Amino acid sequence: MAGRFTPRPTRTTVRGGQVGVPAGVPRQAVAPGKVPGKVRTVVPDGPLDLGLVLGPLRRGPGDPTFRAMPDGSVWRACRTPAGPGTLRVGVRGVEVRGEAWGPGAEWLLEQLPELLGAADDPSVFVPRHRVVAMARHRRPGLRLTRTGLVMESLIPSVLEQKVTTDEAYRAWRLLVRKYGEPAPGPAPGRMCVMPDAGTWRLIPSWEWHRAGVDNKRASTILRAVRVAARLEEAVGMSPAQAQARLEVVPGIGPWTSAEVVQRSHGAADAVTVGDLHLPGIVGFALAGDRDADDSVMLELLEPYAGQRHRAARLILLSGRVPGRRAPKMPRVDIGRL
């Protein structure tokens, strides 16, 4: 019965990684007339919810690098160490079928098991609160993905600094569509691979402005792409070491580095500190304290040491949030100024 009465997505559960992926099995992997890609089949060692596992990689419903299709498949357009690539993932019974195109196809298929959470061990997690236990019961297919890619998570995370998610998603969408390249293979319409480091460096200042990105965030991204190769090396480090390397770049702090390693490393213990809403959500869910700050949040999550990020995601997925007491943060489009 677990998962049968899963609540509909809300803004909070979407932040927890919930993406609606229809439970359909495509009859045909590729449309007629299209060149088939390279294929790999993986059999997970437990329940797998494709929407929950890959959901954190989507940057808004209009993300040009991510698409969830009505047939139950998920498409990703990535810039891998081997070049651009497109990956299509679909569940067929107990198997997960990955099909990839482009120069990065082999790399994407090699990473497929870890992308689906093979490096994650949810069995070590022990719920200590009823709300967490219920969320876990309803989401048995939650696994922490590990992409093995740093820059594809770092750049959109920097765009999300101190602005509304809608503003950040818009900036990511505009910049990737204008300066990225079409996704290889028979990808759904308008899917793009994000620009390479050299292209990010050449984006004119007025285009950042038109996308609604202020000079502080744009400068942080430009500093990061200058050392992109060194930052990508952090994939081979522990999450804590990777965060330390990322935070060497001015403008990248604990909030941003945690958001990155949660995706690039599948870091089960990387808590997002410095967030505007998360401490209040965690505090309200675990102790009825809607005014909790980072120190209170970390204290409440202490029983989950080693698995604090998973606990925070389950709390977000529970949908248990305090009622709004103030209007939403106003959206400011600096591109109109």
Image (cartoon, rainbow, N blue to C red):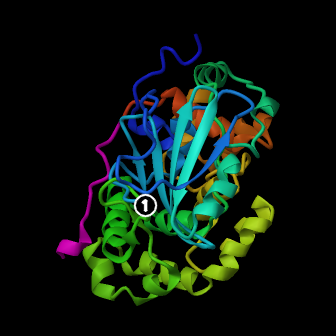
Amino acid carrying mark 1 in the image = Gly
Q: Quadrant of residue 287?
A: top right
| 39 sits to left or right of 62 | right
Residue 268 belongs to the span the image colors magenta = no
- Total number of numbered discs in the rendering: 1
Residue 332 belongs to the span the image colors magenta = yes
Quadrant showing the N terminus: top right
- The correct choice, above or below, for 106 with respect to 144 in the image is below
**Which residue occupies 29% across, 72% down?**
211
Give how far across and how far down residue 240 sits, in percent: 77, 62
Residue at the outermost front position: 33
Q: Residue 289: in sight, yes or no?
A: no
**Which residue occupies 80% across, 61% down?**
238
Q: Quadrant of residue 144?
A: top right
**Residue with the mark numbered 1:** 185
Q: What is the chief secondary structure element of the magenta stretch?
A: loop
Give how far across and how far down residue 161 sits, in percent: 46, 64
Give how far across and how far down residue 136 sits, in percent: 64, 24
For the residue carrying disc 1, how many other residues have a C-alpha within 10 Å: few (<14), some (14-19), or many (20+)? some
**Which residue occupies 44% across, 76% down?**
195
Give SS at disc 1.
loop
Q: Nearer the viewer, residue 316 or 19?
A: 19
Q: Nearer the viewer, residue 77 or 247?
A: 77
What's drawn in magenta, residue-wise?
325-337
**Which residue occupies 18% across, 76% down?**
337
- The correct choice, above or below, for 262 with respect to 221 in the image is above
Q: Nearer the viewer, residue 242 or 144?
A: 144
Residue at the outermost left position: 336
| 88 sits to left or right of 127 | left
Give how far across and how far down residue 265 sits, in percent: 70, 56
